[in-house]
Amino acid sequence: MKKVIFSIIAVALFAACNNSSENQTPSLENIKGTAVFGDSVKNNQVIELASIQTEMKGESKKDLKIKGVVKEVCQNKGCWLTMTLDNGDEMRVTFKNYKIFVPKDLGGKEVVLDGFAYTDTTSIEKLRHYAKDAGKTEAEIAAITSPKEQIAFEAKGVVVMN
């Protein structure tokens, strides 16, 4: 009888531990925001932008969903945006197959991106092109004299959170 009671208690404790909220599977529903551009983004395994370098673990390409604040948007078409990493570096976000265009006034808003992060070296010519798209002055554009290695992100979906 004692063995039966002990077994029942053990099973009940095991079930209670496995039903805790920290062990539940994240929601696979779409993230709700004020706007969606491109594909919808599922609400699972979203990391904060501050964790992207740690999450990549030296890999050259990694599928991720990230949440962070937009710093700057292409003022020509809305065809790219930048976000600031914890170390102060910028991460340029481009859009899969050049099919997504975001509002030019997205700067300062929080977004969730679904896509992949990778390490990229951007040429002087492309950096100058981005600077022109961002509305920089001729002097600022001319001051770009070396390529830049940085983390970049190609998004297939963007959800604006605020």
Image (tube, rainbow, N blue to C red):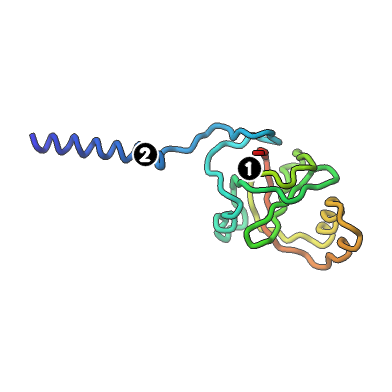
Which residue in the rendered view is the most extreme toward the right? 138
Image spot of residue 132 (x, y percent):
87, 54
Q: Is residue 68 left or right of residue 21?
A: right
The tally of labels here is 2
The residue wearing badge 1 is 112
Q: Amino acid at mark 1?
A: Val
Q: State the residue at coordinates (66%, 35%).
A: 39
The label number, if any, that marks residue 31 in the structure image: none
Image quarter hosting the C terminus: top right
Foreground of the two, 93 or 123: 93
Q: CA distance from mark 2 to mark 1?
A: 27 Å
Among all residues in the image, which is located at the extreme left? 1
* Quarter that holds the N terminus: top left
In the rendered image, residue 41, in percent from the top left (x then y), is placed at 61, 37
Callout 1: 10 Å neighbours few (<14), some, many (20+)? many
Q: Position of residue 155 (x, y in %)?
A: 68, 44
The residue shown at (81%, 58%) is 127
Circle 2 SS class: loop
**Where is 51 relative to 41, above or below?**
below
Q: Nearer the viewer, residue 35 or 58?
A: 35
* Image vertical order of residue 20 relative to residue 91, above or below: above
Return the x and y of residue 6 as percentages of the image width and height: 15, 38
Q: Amino acid at mark 2?
A: Ser
N-term mark: 2 or 1:
2
Q: Would residue 156 be found to the left or right of residue 45 on screen?
A: right
Quarter-of-image position of residue 19: top left
Which residue sits at x=54%, y=32%?
29
Taking the image as shown, residue 134 lies to the left or right of residue 160, namely: right
Above-or-below relation of 141 to 35 = below
Residue drawn at x 52%, y 34% as measured from the top left: 28
Looking at the rendering, which quadrant does residue 7 occupy? top left
Q: Which residue is mark 2?
A: 20
